[in-house]
Image: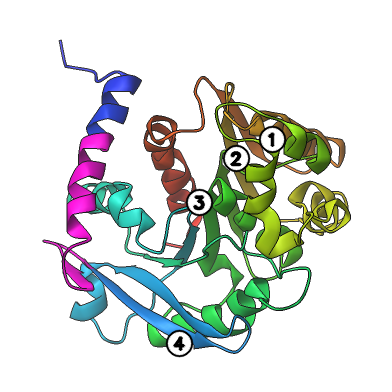
Amino acid sequence: MPYVMSSRARALDRLRWLICGVCLLCLPVVLQAATGRVECNSLPSKFVHRAVAYCVMLPPSFDADKARHFPILYLLHGLGDNEQFFIHSGEWNLVEDLRAKGELPDFLIATPDGRASFYINAKDGKERYEDFLVQEFLPFIEKRYRVSPGRANRAISGISMGGYGALHLAFRHPQLFSAVSAHSAALIEKLPVFLGGSNAQGTQANRSRLFAGVLGSPPDAAYWNQESPITLARAANLAGMKIYFDCGDQDDYGFEAGAAALDKVLTARHIAHEYHLYPGRHDVIYFAEHLPASLEFHVRLFPH
């Protein structure tokens, strides 16, 4: 009988890749693999008033065929992480493994350093991260790395804060993205209730500080609601957009409630989407187990 690895075993296996990936952070900014490479650099921005670090995963054919163009997946990290997320998360190893088996077409993955921006423009206008992404980062990446033109060749994904950002950007700019996915997105229906919560993840003051750079101090709940993917989903033109999101049923921050709210809005509007509530928390084990699902989701949709 063939051996079938359990979901937990798969997650632990990916965690071993994660530990190996952390060691890679000590290497130079260009990481070479047997079949592809990762290039890391930075892009000066007039919208956030600093150079924003980024990494791009390049398939082997990128260097082998200088005339070829590729689809791209923008991958947004969570709070406390950085542009090297897909290296130390194990996603890089997963992509290379699938590609070596011939199960993955060639496409690019780009990850910018989002800091604590939630990938939106700050309320006070000092750091306009959304404007940076749309007006500076996407055009720069797609010209420099030979991205195929058109919405069909561009998708976006993210985890936690990055999941919020991916959904926000896709719903705010549906003309740019053909597909969006999110794991454990930071979807919060009632910000004052969330900020008033207190558990092992932090007191009210700690939670408020997480949003200070984007929403001000105290955090502006009205601005949060205005920018929320749940709010945007009520009116955005999402015809033709492919949507996937999931969350753990014991999410440490209660983000499963926001995921259910988004599902309700999209269902009421008869917008096709794929939503899953899986067993799990808001932790690396959950992310490691479910990251392959979004990767496969986007691979199916990219032009071949």
Q: CA distance from mark 4 to mark 3?
A: 26 Å
- The Cα–Cα distance between marks 2 and 1, rounded to whole angstroms, is 8 Å
Q: Residues within 10 Å of mark 3 (few under 14, many from 20)?
A: many
Rendered image quadrant of residue 85: bottom left
- Residue at which label 4 appears: 143
Pointer 1 residue: 259
Residue with the most extreme top position: 1
The dot on residue 78 is 3
**286 sits left or right of 214 in the view:** left
Chain-order first, disc 3 or disc 2: 3
Give the residue at mark 2. 245
Residue 196 placement (x, y as % from top left): 76, 34
Q: On the picture, is 123 further left or further right than 53? A: right
The CA span between labels 2 and 4 is 29 Å
Closer to us: 192 or 91 = 192
Q: Amino acid at mark 3?
A: Gly
Q: Position of residue 72 (x, y in %)?
A: 45, 67
137 part of magenta stretch: no
Element type at marker 2? strand
What residue lies at 78% left-to-right and 73% top-to-bottom?
124
What is the spatial separation of the Cα atoms under label 3 and label 1, in whole angstroms?
Answer: 16 Å
